[in-house]
């Protein structure tokens, strides 16, 4: 792990959310840990909960956080872009979202050339410019992210080469396996071979890039 943006890939049930929680728990326990802003898309009874994370506080809105700041803040998953925006505004923080498809599909990804004042998606800003992002107070800080999706084929192409680490779990779609193969996130002679490798993964099994 470390700074930058870590990507977790895997079909539903691959175990990517469990792996993310383990990583957040380890990082949040470090003495120089950044602030963690977590998007909670729902939890099933009997499975690990963000409430089990030491120091976790739950908020209904991002505006509520400014009134009672917390180093580990959990928000409902209905507005993930607001949480991404908060990550940038606060600075020295990490966005955690185990299902970024909602954020990717709910807004314009890039600023329009004729309306640059509208800005990019805050998620795009974190991935592309998070290492030197200016926060709400005007200071340049570093922000990162732990993000996951079950459809790597849908990731914007302008994110290629920007992830510091990629965990790849079980995938069954050829399009998803092809994207993983083309990005070089798995070692295989072709996309068909990559698909065969990935669909054979057991739940909880992940390959890691870079090796």
Image: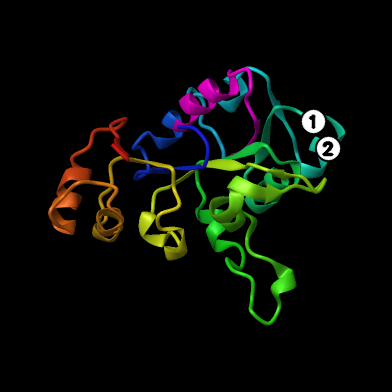
Location of residue 70 (image quadrant): top right
Q: 211 or 17: which is nearer to us?
A: 211
How many marks do you count on the picture? 2
- Which residues lie in the magenta part? 20-40
Q: Which mark is residue 119?
A: none
**Is 197 inside the magenta-drawn segment?**
no
Q: In screen coordinates, is 166 left or right of 21?
A: left
Task: Please give the name of the residue rendered at 38% of the width and 54% of the height, measured from the top-left corner.
Answer: 151
Residue 175's spot in the image, x, y percent? 28, 61
Q: Are marks 1 and 2 in contact (CB under 8 Å)?
A: yes
Helix, strand, or loop for circle 1?
loop
Q: Quadrant of the C terminus?
A: top left
Q: Which residue is mark 1?
A: 69
Cα distance between the residues tagged 1 and 2: 6 Å
Q: Which residue is mark 2?
A: 66
Q: In screen coordinates, is 90 left or right of 152?
A: right
Location of residue 25 (image quadrant): top right
Identify the colour scheme used. Answer: rainbow
Task: Please give the name of the residue rendered at 60% of the width and 48% of the height, measured from the top-left corner.
Answer: 130
Task: Please give the name of the residue rendered at 18% of the width and 50% of the height, measured from the top-left corner.
Answer: 194
Give above or below for 115 relative to 18: below
Q: In screen coordinates, is 3 left or right of 169?
A: right
Q: 207 or 134: which is nearer to us?
A: 134
Residue 78's spot in the image, x, y percent? 65, 49
Task: Please give the name of the residue rendered at 28% of the width and 32% of the height, measured from the top-left corner.
Answer: 205
Give above or below for 54 relative to 79: above
Residue 78 in view in this figure:
no
């Amino acid at each position: 792990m470390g700074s930058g943006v870590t990507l977790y890939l895997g079909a539903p049930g691959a175990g990517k959310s469990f792996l993310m929680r383990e990583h957040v728990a380890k990082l949040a326990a470090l003495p120089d840990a950044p602030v963690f802003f977590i998007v909670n898309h729902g939890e099933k009874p009997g499975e690990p909960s963000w409430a089990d994370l030491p120091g976790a506080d739950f908020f209904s809105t991002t505006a509520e956080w400014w009134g009672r700041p917390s180093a580990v803040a959990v928000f409902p998953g209905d507005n993930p872009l607001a949480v991404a925006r908060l990550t940038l505004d606060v600075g020295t923080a990490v966005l955690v979202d185990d299902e970024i498809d909602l954020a990717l599909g709910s807004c314009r990804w890039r600023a329009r050339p004729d309306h640059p004042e509208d800005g990019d998606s805050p998620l795009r800003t974190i991935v592309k410019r998070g290492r030197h992002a200016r926060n709400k107070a005007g200071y340049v800080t570093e922000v990162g992210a732990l993000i996951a999706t079950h459809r790597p084929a849908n990731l914007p192409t302008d994110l290629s080469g920007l992830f510091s680490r990629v965990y790849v779990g079980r995938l069954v779609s050829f399009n998803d396996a092809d994207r993983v193969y083309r990005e070089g996130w798995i070692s295989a002679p072709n996309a068909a071979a990559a698909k065969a490798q990935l669909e054979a993964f057991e739940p909880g099994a992940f390959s890691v890039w870079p090796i």
